[in-house]
Amino acid sequence: MKLLLTSAGIKNTSIRDALVDLLGKPIAQSNALCIPTAIYAFPGGAGSAWKLISGRAASPLCELGWKSLGVLELTALPSIDRAHWTTAVEETDALLAGGGDPLYLGYWIQQSGLADLIPSLRETVWVGVSGGSLVMGPHVGEEFVYGSPPTTCGDRALGLVDFAMFPHLDHEAMPDHSMANAERWAGSLPVPGYAIDDETAIKVVGSTVEVVSEGHWELFNPGPNASESA
């Protein structure tokens, strides 16, 4: 699977170009499935899910002009015939994972059976927004453990990449997402951590990791005072 891990969706031309590059064709020729599951763990989740799917969310994702767009609701999948949804996933070009609770999303990725399918989706592009990006790391950090569902696994996520992410860096409406708090977050991690603002994304193909940004970001490496920034 190819990954485009964003803080707030396809916010600028550079991130959009990265998406097209991963798809290998224009968005207008690509099919996508939207995964709103993560947001249900937050108050007002049903309304936020509708905004995401209808293209009215603050994080551009579903409104990009896809050839076709469907909804993959992970909480429904265990109760239906597996063949009803696996074919759709295997045939889609992109999975669009909206924001919310990353560990709740990770739980349902595993419970739904999607996790078992991911290794075979080599050409599929996972486009994550906030929690939909964080879930791909090995850890999210205690700041992003919201307690739904209750977990005995601490802050551990799926581990499909070997770094963690701190989204919405220095967002004026999110004072807790300051650089100082990002530094504290990174200090508790056993893995590298990227702090990224809403104009930044991380593009992953195999073992190649590329930061795509029209904003600012910082990479905190394990060890004292080790970091890179832009």
Image (cartoon, rainbow, N blue to C red):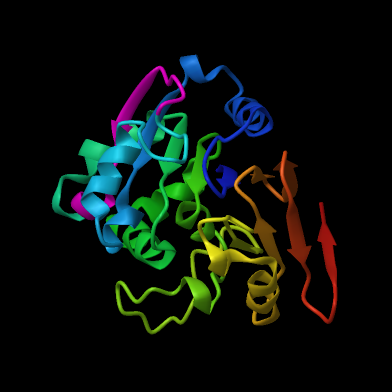
Counting the numbered discs, the total is 0
Residue at 63% over, 73% down: 181
> Quick one: 199 or 39, which is closer to the camera?
199
Residue at 61% over, 23% down: 24
Residue at 44% over, 19% down: 65
Q: Is residue 161 left or right of residue 90?
A: right
In the rendered image, residue 219, in percent from the top left (x then y), is placed at: 76, 62
Residue at 44% over, 74% down: 145
> Quick one: 81 or 184, which is closer to the camera?
184
The question of residue 65 being in magenta is answered with yes
Tell me where the magenta segment starts and ends, as one range: 63-77
User: Which image quarter holds the N terminus?
Assistant: top right
Quadrant assignment, res 229:
bottom right
Q: Is residue 203 left or right of residue 87?
A: right
Q: Is residue 126 visible?
A: yes
In the rendered image, residue 135, in percent from the top left (x then y), is placed at: 49, 60
Q: Is residue 36 left or right of residue 78?
A: right
Q: Is residue 201 left or right of residue 89?
A: right
The question of residue 177 being in magenta is answered with no
- Depicted 65 relative to depicted 124: above or below: above
In the rendered image, residue 76, in percent from the top left (x then y), is placed at: 19, 50
> Quick one: 215 or 224, which is closer to the camera?
215
Q: Is residue 73 visible?
A: no
In the rendered image, residue 119, in percent from the top left (x then y), is placed at: 50, 49
